[in-house]
Image (cartoon, helix red, strand yellow):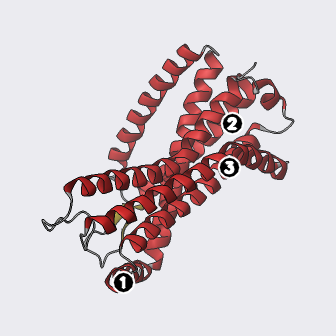
Amino acid sequence: MLTNLLKYEFMKKWKSMKYILLGYALIEVILLVTSKVLHATSGDPVPFINDGSSDMQVGFFLFICTIFYFLFIVLISIYPFFEGVTRYEKDLSGKQAPLELMIPAPSWKKILSKLISTIVVTIGCAIISLASVMIYILVMSNLDKVVLTQISNGLKTILDYPFSLLFTIIYVILSYVSFYLLINFCTAVAKAITHKNKLSTLISIITFGALVAIILYLSIKIENYPIVTFTFFKGLATGMASSLSSIILDIIILIFFFAGTSYIMEKRIEY
């Protein structure tokens, strides 16, 4: 059943995202080509660094194109998250809610399938975003050897800390999952009380604020009992510190939101 639910979720996401991805690719290509042409026209050896001989108007348009290029990168990166939480809200009270709630599967499987599909799509969009950044840097630098060397050295530095890199990736994913489940939990609580959109939105916001305050309070208190402290990327100028107690708290919070959302969706929401 979980496999079928995953196929169903991926199918919905593909239908909603295929034209967005196509539009993103076309817009980014247009902006990149325009930026390259403007850069060549400006006469500056390095983008955005005016040596006094280039056209200020051309430099301004180049700056605007670059801003929009990276703005679309940010938008495509965060789109899967907002699409996921918005779709979950519609699955509970939209036109397709009766069909969604009548699917003969436990609620935890429905939520898990939504979570997995959202994570996979987010990772895919993150890879696309990183590729877009790299393409921009390489194209605008004309594949300059100095730039390539700096990128290579940066990657080697990160890969010199494989355990720290793995932990960082896992921590980012867990934080993403917790925040995603937190919003879905707030939505489930609101929809269990009322299906009126304005009132349910207000309840969701209040619930979200209260839960964030509680989590922050617990996070501050738990730091007084670290159990074991870890330092990641210790050899770098900006290391990362964490403790076993905070990791345990994060896992407990994640489990609570997952179980709570599943229970409310299973027992409390009717349409």
Q: Which residue is mark 2?
A: 262
Q: Which residue is mark 1?
A: 153
- Res 39 visible: yes
Crowd rating for badge 1 (residues with CA inside 10 Å; few <14, some 14–19, many 20+): few
Q: Are marks 2 and 1 in contact (CB under 8 Å)?
A: no
Going 42% across and 79% down the picture, which residue do you hit? 155
Q: Are marks 3 and 2 in contact (CB under 8 Å)?
A: no
Q: Rounded to the nearest whole Å, what is the CA distance between mark 2 and mark 1?
A: 46 Å
Residue situated furthest left in the rendering: 52
Give percent across and percent down for residue 212: 42, 35
Q: How many marks?
A: 3
Crowd rating for badge 3 (residues with CA inside 10 Å; few <14, some 14–19, many 20+): few
The amino acid sitting under disc 1 is Asn
For the C terminus, the quadrant is top right
Give percent across and percent down for residue 6: 77, 50
Which-is-in-front pick, marks 3 and 2?
3
Q: Of residues 215 and 173, which is closer to you in this image? A: 173
